[in-house]
């Protein structure tokens, strides 16, 4: 069996984000495909307090591809629409999408903002476009969104709610600890929980897409702990079976001793979603305040991109940059509060440009 990393673009967290603010109404990509006549169709959903389209929430919405920018005609869209199917005919001017590879973006223009202040609500890259997680969109397939993650869909459902039918592959093999001993039990999760079979192998479903370096989360009574592993490079297609042994590595600088969960300790970020910056609010009990700490920020494929040292303050700002000072792209990011080299709390956030 091929030796790879157990990885996922969607980490599993037990800690909820407390007191999250209500996001602004914003449009997002729910599904995209090319029809048999090679015309494109984009399913658009709406995020915010109502999760519905309302004319009072949107001044205008724009679709952007490599061929240019075009405004969505909103005069035919009814209030309380939950899913909107957009084609080139839905725009004020024709807009093409390159089947070989493109990056599709949605901009929302909200009432009350001056001209030029657009919010990049969402983007989807495929084929040879930068940041793509898909080599192509096979004929008859779509790219849909499941639990916030884009994946290939064997059974497109443009115009109706997405489900996992035709969106998953099966990952199976043996799971080894850092001492190369087989693990035949325990609670682990990727996109979905891992189960162990009678022969000692594991099985789990993963969403159909490319995967790169990320981390495994081990769920224990004391909370969720991240475990590093060896390198991964995998391309999963719907309904495929991938045989791969998993070799866990040392925890990411975290001591192996179990860290008790501390209800008095928390971290939240506001706003979430955010653009261009967000603030972390941290509460640390007195018995932990002298511990050396930091907020670590990871991208959607598990790479640590930024670190914020913790001092005596209760508020810390992240301006959406990486360790080189460059602005990061829109997407899902993860953070964890580390004290004395031990992960105490975790959470997720969305950057919308």
Image (cartoon, rainbow, N blue to C red):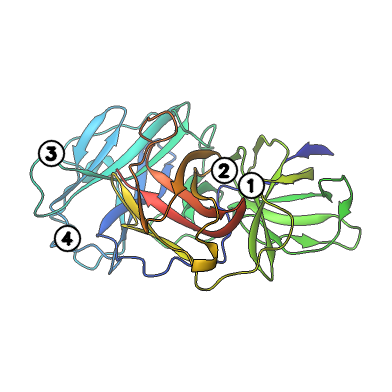
- Number of residues whose C-alpha sits closer than 10 Å to that of mark 2, classed few (under 14), some (14–19) or many (20 or more): many
Q: Earlier in the sequence, mark 1 or mark 2?
A: 1
Nearer the observer, 199 or 287: 287
The residue that mark 1 highlights is 215
Quarter containing the N terminus: top right
Residue 83, image x and y in percent?
33, 60
Nearer the observer, 89 or 119: 119
Q: Marks 2/3: CA distance? A: 33 Å
Camera sees residue 158: yes
Camera sees residue 164: no
Placement of 29 over or under 100, stated as above or below? below
Q: Earlier in the sequence, mark 4 or mark 2?
A: 4
On the rendered structure, is 21 left or right of 213?
left
Assign a secondary structure to mark 1. Answer: loop
Q: Marks 1/3: CA distance? A: 39 Å
- Number of residues whose C-alpha sits closer than 10 Å to that of mark 4, classed few (under 14), some (14–19) or many (20 or more): some
Q: Are marks 1 and 2 in contact (CB under 8 Å)?
A: yes
Assign a secondary structure to mark 2. Answer: loop
Q: Are marks 2 and 3 in contact (CB under 8 Å)?
A: no
Q: Are marks 4 and 2 in contact (CB under 8 Å)?
A: no
Q: Earlier in the sequence, mark 1 or mark 3?
A: 3
* Eye-nearest disc, 1 or 3: 1
Placement of 47 over or under 213, stated as above or below? below
Q: Marks 4/3: CA distance? A: 17 Å
Q: Are marks 4 and 3 in contact (CB under 8 Å)?
A: no
Which of the 4 quarters of the picture holds residue 91? Answer: top left
The residue that mark 3 highlights is 116
As drawn, the label of residue 57 is: 4
Residue at 68%, 64% (x, y): give it: 219
The residue that mark 2 highlights is 302
* Eye-nearest disc, 4 or 3: 3
């Amino acid at each position: 069996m091929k030796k790879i990393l157990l990885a996922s673009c969607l980490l599993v967290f037990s800690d909820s984000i407390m007191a999250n603010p209500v996001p602004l109404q914003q449009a997002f990509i729910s599904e995209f495909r090319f029809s048999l006549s090679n015309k494109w169709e984009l399913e658009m959903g709406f995020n915010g307090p109502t999760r519905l389209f309302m004319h009072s929430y949107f001044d205008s919405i724009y679709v952007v591809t490599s061929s240019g920018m075009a405004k969505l005609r909103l005069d035919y869209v009814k209030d309380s629409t939950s899913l909107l199917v957009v084609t080139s005919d839905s725009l004020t001017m024709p807009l093409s999408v390159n089947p070989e590879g493109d990056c599709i973006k949605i901009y929302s223009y909200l009432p009350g903002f001056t001209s030029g202040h657009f919010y990049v609500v969402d983007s989807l890259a495929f084929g040879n476009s930068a940041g793509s997680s898909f080599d192509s969109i096979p004929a008859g397939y779509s790219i849909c969104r499941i639990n916030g993650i884009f994946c290939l869909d064997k059974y497109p459902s443009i115009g109706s709610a997405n489900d996992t039918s035709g969106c998953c592959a099966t990952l199976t093999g043996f799971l080894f600890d850092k001492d190369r001993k087989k693990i035949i039990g325990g609670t682990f999760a990727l996109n979905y929980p891992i189960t162990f079979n009678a022969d000692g192998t594991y099985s789990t479903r993963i969403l159909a897409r490319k995967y790169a370096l990320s981390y495994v989360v081990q769920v224990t009574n004391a909370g969720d702990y991240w475990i590093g592993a060896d390198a991964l490079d995998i391309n999963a297609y719907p309904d495929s079976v991938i045989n791969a042994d998993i070799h866990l590595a040392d925890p990411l600088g975290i001591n192996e001793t179990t860290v008790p969960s501390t209800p008095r300790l928390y971290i939240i970020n506001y706003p979430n979603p955010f653009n261009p910056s967000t603030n972390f609010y941290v509460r640390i009990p007195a018995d932990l305040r002298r511990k050396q700490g930091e907020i670590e920020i990871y991208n959607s494929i598990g790479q640590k991109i930024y670190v914020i040292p913790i001092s005596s303050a209760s508020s810390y700002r992240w301006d959406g940059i990486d360790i080189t000072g460059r602005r990061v792209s829109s997407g899902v990011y993860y953070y964890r509060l580390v004290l004395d080299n031990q992960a105490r709390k975790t959470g997720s956030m969305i950057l919308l440009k």
